[in-house]
Image (spheres, rainbow, N blue to C red):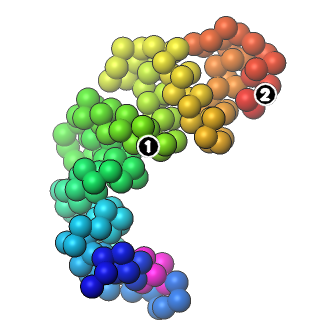
Amino acid sequence: GDAGAMANLGFCLAKGVGVSQNKQQAFEWYKRAATLGNAVAMFNLGLCFEKGDGVVRDMKQTIEWWQRAAELGYADAMHNLGVVLFKGFTGTQDKQQAIKWWKQAAAVGHVQAMNNLGEIFFKGDGVEKNKQQAVAWFKQAADLGDAEAMFKLGVCFEKGDGVLQNQQQAFEWY
């Protein structure tokens, strides 16, 4: 069996693409692909456990599968793992681990991870407040075309938060 094909079949079954939607069968195909080392399937398996799609909801399993996918370099898993750890959805909050995962996701171009890093540096949540660093993260995401980051940059330039106030720059980012 080809793990990529198994993961794709799981996706088609989960979404009802070309076949009747069947979340239990999707879960089974994701599980088969994940056990063969497919990071996308591991991530999707984590989503199944998170949402209770085709399986009983289990956040411990969610984290386990996202951790495996993240360790294989899958950026969405790094990002989601960071969110779960930062917010403490499992009952244990670990902001430093979350930040580590967000930085790794950002390093491979994950714009939401960049936005999350910008937010925490802007507010000083889990890190020392540093609005210049926040602006740098927002700019990195904005340069990749992320509308949310562009808006946040516009606000920073409009108010002079982390940068010199500049209405022209604000207008351009809005």
Which residue corresponds to the image point at 36% horizontal and 75% vertical from the top-left? 4
Tell me, yes or no, if residue 41 can be seen here.
Answer: yes
Residue farthest toward the front in the current orientation of the protein: 2
Q: Which mark is residue 172?
A: 2
Would you identify the image quadrant in which residue 172 lies?
A: top right
Q: Which residues are magenta?
A: 11-16
- The majority secondary structure of the magenta stretch comes to helix
Secondary structure type for disc 1: loop
Which residue corresponds to the image point at 49% horizontal and 84% vertical from the top-left? 16
Say if 113 sits above or below 26 in the image.
above
What amino acid type should be assigned to the residue bearing mark 2?
Answer: Glu
* Residue 57, percent from left and from top: 25, 66
**The N terminus is located in which quarter?**
bottom left
Q: CA distance from mark 2 to mark 1?
A: 26 Å
Q: Is residue 63 left or right of residue 166?
A: left
Q: Earlier in the sequence, mark 2 or mark 1?
A: 1
**Which residue position holds label 1?**
108
**The C terminus is located in which quarter?**
top right
* Residue 11, percent from left and from top: 42, 76
* Residue 23, percent from left and from top: 36, 81
Say if 97 sits above or below 56 in the image.
above
Secondary structure type for disc 2: helix
